Image: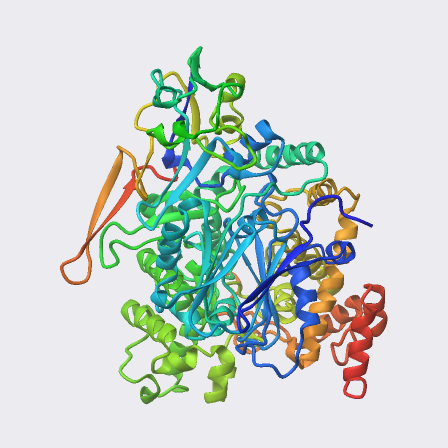
Amino acid sequence: MSRISVIPERCSGCRICELVCTEQHFHVNNPKKAAIRVVALYPNPVIRAPIVCRQCDDPECAKACPADAIKVNDGLVTIDPELCTNCLACVDACPYSAIFTHTDIPTPIKCDLCSGSPRCVAACPKAALELADQVKDQPQVAGKGIEYAPFRELRVQGEGAAERVIRYADGGGSR
Amino acid sequence: MKPRGGYFKKILNVDLSRGTAKRADVSDEFALKYVGGRGWGARITWDNLRPGMDPLSPGNLITIAPGPLNGLLVPASGKTSFCCISPATGLYADSNMGGSFGTEMRMAGLDALSIRGRAAKLSYLWIDDDRVEVRQAEQLKGTNATETERTLKDELGGEDVRVATIGPAGENGVVFATVNSDWGRNAGRAGMGAVLGSKNLKAIAIRGTHDLPVYDMESLMEVSKRAFDYLMHHTSMRIWQRQGLMTVVEYANTVGFLPTRNFADAHFDGAGKINGDVMESTYKIGDSACFACPMCCGNICLVKSGRWKGTACEGPEYETAAMFGPNLGVDDFSFILKANELCDALGIDTISTGNLIAMVIEAREKGLLTKEDLGDLQIGWGNQEGIVRLMEMIARREGIGAHMSRGSKGMFAKWPALQRIAVQVKGLEQSAYDSRASMCMALAYGTCDIGAHHNRAWPISKELQMGKDWGLQEKVDLVSYHQAVRPVFDMLGVCRLPWIELSIDENLYAEMYSAVVGIRFTLGDLLEKSKAIYDLTRAISVKLGVRRADDYPPPRTFKDPIVSGPFAGKAADPKEYEAILEMYYQRRGWDPKTGIPKRETLISDGLPDVADDLQRTLGAKS
């Protein structure tokens, strides 16, 4: 059993993970069909974070699926294309925004770990993706920003009384 | 020949005066002959050329073209060319932007976007796959480029949308205004932002979902793997990821070409305070890469304390560090970050801005500008507050800043004596390599088709390290080769840094292009096409008045010897330059007296119509 663990401090936002994912699964060059997406939100926080399925033990997407098309097999959360009606309830239900859609693809797109050796993990030039048994402190889409537990804050007195808060991660740009 | 991939064969033609947007077909012949990117842009610029036209009038057509490798799973495929007549030089120019903007355009099913006219009110263009809308943007008037991007992304669909935008400087017609995207990536040179501003176009937002056309995915992936493997195993890869182009500061200072105080010197005592190690240890908080690039030369930096606390930006890279550091007499890295952040926000080019401010400081010292000319502005070498204030004045066209906003040529019109100390060619301010010890680099600046920029040839490193005993012919050969091979990257829509910095085999790019279009092309074939395009951009500028007399580096190159460092006492020899220029024209097939491409040169380029046109319009004059 394994999962993809994201280390956002290392991510450069190059999106090679998105490209190898679509090449692997659809044999096309189209990052909009990837099961992993780099979110880069700025000016603050100044960080890029790949978002990908965490293969939850008790997944919300499966609970939300009215067609019972999502199962956990050997630790892998899988959508059965025969049963899936593409209603997208799973996309809304995923607390991590890690299920994606594309009009050309008849089912929602989510990570299948490439049969155990994910292409994105191997291809990441910054080693920002790792295979792990458990994941913790993962970046998370929250509204129009990213939440990430290790964030630090720099408070800056702006003009007048306004205070700006810049959030960043220690060790950013490291590898 | 018919390409079987690589192109949608569609250009979106937008006329902002009429409010129309039409997809036009591109012929197979056009696609292959001009390849893409700068190649397509140059030909479209030629076809729409109207000598005498004001570059900031609605008639100036701007073409944005990513190129057939852009967006593909090949190293550093995020490059896009902006091409038009430059308001800074009045000549042909293109400027290359990284990031993901061009890829999004391709995914919307477009190979290129051409924009003419002027919208009645400030507007932005929204391309949502096949749907195109011109939307009003009055609420964004005067907004910083970086904020505009955030606002439009929030409004239109977050990270699935890419936005290229101008800042207040572009709206105000500053002739070195940039187009900014992905927070810190710019079409930085020659005033592309001013051209969009003159069209009342604040931004272009795109969302695309299409697969990119590739004829032979299997072959492409095979070449791609070799290319990525080579780069990932390169011994310098890690330092590139850590410091990117910031490694060049120390190198330039050691070798002796670091521009210092308006290029008066080429060596800076404070370089150790503004180099890559300082950046990495004190300021860096993240990496940033263009699309599909493993090298991630972009460094995200934050100033955590001191006068410029709270400054955050992507950068600086070498040019910015040199132009706002040594060239302005500043040895404080946090200030360089402040200047970088401000340039991105205002939408002005870091090179031209740093260069022009240095000229003003020197001019004030020498009395070429008076106290009255500067008003209440206090400025001098290393005066950080004064420099920041002047940057704002340029973007808002206030006081001396209003004159500076018109670039070198604008300054000369008001103060002709500045020509002696200005460091520019053809009206474009020189980038951050001193050429007094490098005849190759002097020739590169003199003959670059957009002015004094290093994009077409950067031979200085090779010449200073290996070419000490070279004859002039070897130097001409190196410059000519650079001027052919470097634009190939701009035509394909990929970055040249994997080649120039990590020495990847340039033949790989011919293999990639062949796999994508389904026709076998060698590097030699691509170099021939590139050479033809260089002759074509020359033909454009010749029609706009450029001759041999315009192909000289700045006066300082010959007249003011370097003060300190390894090349102290060195200035370029004017006689040697005359000789090398002559040999350069011979090699290019341009007339040595006039610098005009010979008829037979254009014929052998496969540009007989251009040859006929030049003969017809210049006949007696040439």
Residue farthest toward the left in the current orientation of the protein: A161
The answer to whether A17 is drawn above or below residue B578 in the figure is above
Residue B416 location (% of width, % of height) = 50, 88
The answer to whether B437 is drawn above or below residue B272 in the figure is below
Quarter of the view holding residue B378: bottom left
Q: Residue at x 27, y 69 (%)?
A: B385
Residue B223 location (% of width, % of height) = 68, 35
The answer to whether A115 is drawn above or below residue B153 in the figure is above
Quarter of the view holding residue B306: bottom left
In this orientation, does residue A76 appear? no
Q: Nearer the viewer, residue B267 or B107?
A: B107
In this orientation, does residue B446 appear? yes
Q: How many marks?
A: 0
Q: Residue at x 44, y 66 (%)?
A: B123
Q: Nearer the viewer, residue B78 or B576?
A: B78
Quarter of the view holding residue B395: bottom left
Residue B431 location (% of width, % of height) = 52, 65
Q: Quadrant of the C terminus of chain B?
A: bottom right
**Is B144 left, or right, of B114 in this rendering?**
left
Residue farthest toward the top in the current orientation of the protein: A74
Q: Nearer the viewer, residue A45 or B479?
A: A45
Q: Nearer the viewer, residue B270 or B419?
A: B419
